[in-house]
Image (cartoon, rainbow, N blue to C red):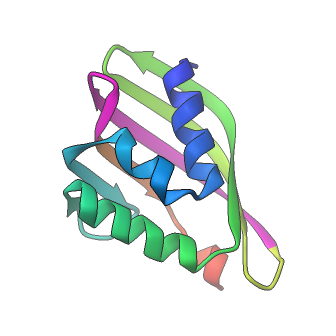
Amino acid sequence: MSDWVKHYFAVVDSMDLEKFAPLHTEDVRLRFGNAETIVGRDAVVRGIGDFWGAIKGLRHNFVQTWDEGDVEIAETLVDYTRHDGKVVTVPCTSILRKRGDLLQDLRIYIDISPVFA
């Protein structure tokens, strides 16, 4: 696993939007589960901020990662802590495409519904 992926997911798990925003290109694209693709840094930050507001915390536990140059794939088990304190673990696979040191495209394959059930 690359240091870049470790850092990216550490920032995500911190739920710190001020650290999260500058990790992305201005024209970043995000597809989260079956939601519509979000385009643009500001839109992605707003969307992720809204999602983080719906949970108390999260933690990515890595199962396997693959690094193919500017594309990294992370298979994870994500522990979501709900506002009621219950922790729900959901399998997830993310495909991260970089431009230089910034994320330009993120595809998150997950069924998030158990977190809110």
Is residue 34 shown to the viewer in this render?
Answer: no
Kindly report the secondary structure that dominates the magenta region of the rendered protein: strand
Residue 70 x %, y %: 31, 20
- In reply to whether residue 91 is colored magenta, the answer given is yes
Answer with the quarter of the image where residue 48 lies. Answer: bottom left
Q: How many marks?
A: 0
- 6, above or below 24, in the image: above
For image coordinates 32% across by 32% down, the residue present is: 102
Q: Residue at (45%, 18%) from the top-left corner? A: 67
| Quarter of the image where the N terminus is located | top right
Q: Is residue 96 left or right of residue 3?
A: left
Q: In the picture provided, is 31 more to the left or to the right than 84?
A: left
Residue sitting at 70 percent across and 65 percent down?
57
The image shows residue 97 at horizontal and vertical percentages of: 30, 32
Toward the front, the furthest residue is 18
Q: Which residues are magenta?
A: 87-104
| Residue sticking out furthest to the right | 85
Q: Quadrant of residue 41?
A: bottom left
| Relative image position of residue 112 (x, y in whole percent) | 55, 69
Residue at point 62%, 82% (across, down)? 116
Outermost residue toward the top in this view: 69
How far across and how far down the image is residue 76, in percent? 62, 42
Report the front residue among 92 and 39. Answer: 39
Q: Is residue 1 above or below residue 98?
A: above
Instruction: Let me know if residue 47 appears in the view.
Output: yes
Quadrant location of the C terminus in the rendered image = bottom right
> Is 76 above or below relative to 78?
above
Q: Relative to 62, is 58 above or below? A: below
Task: Specify whether residue 96 is painted magenta.
Answer: yes
Q: Nearer the viewer, residue 30 or 25?
A: 25
Q: Quadrant of residue 62?
A: top right
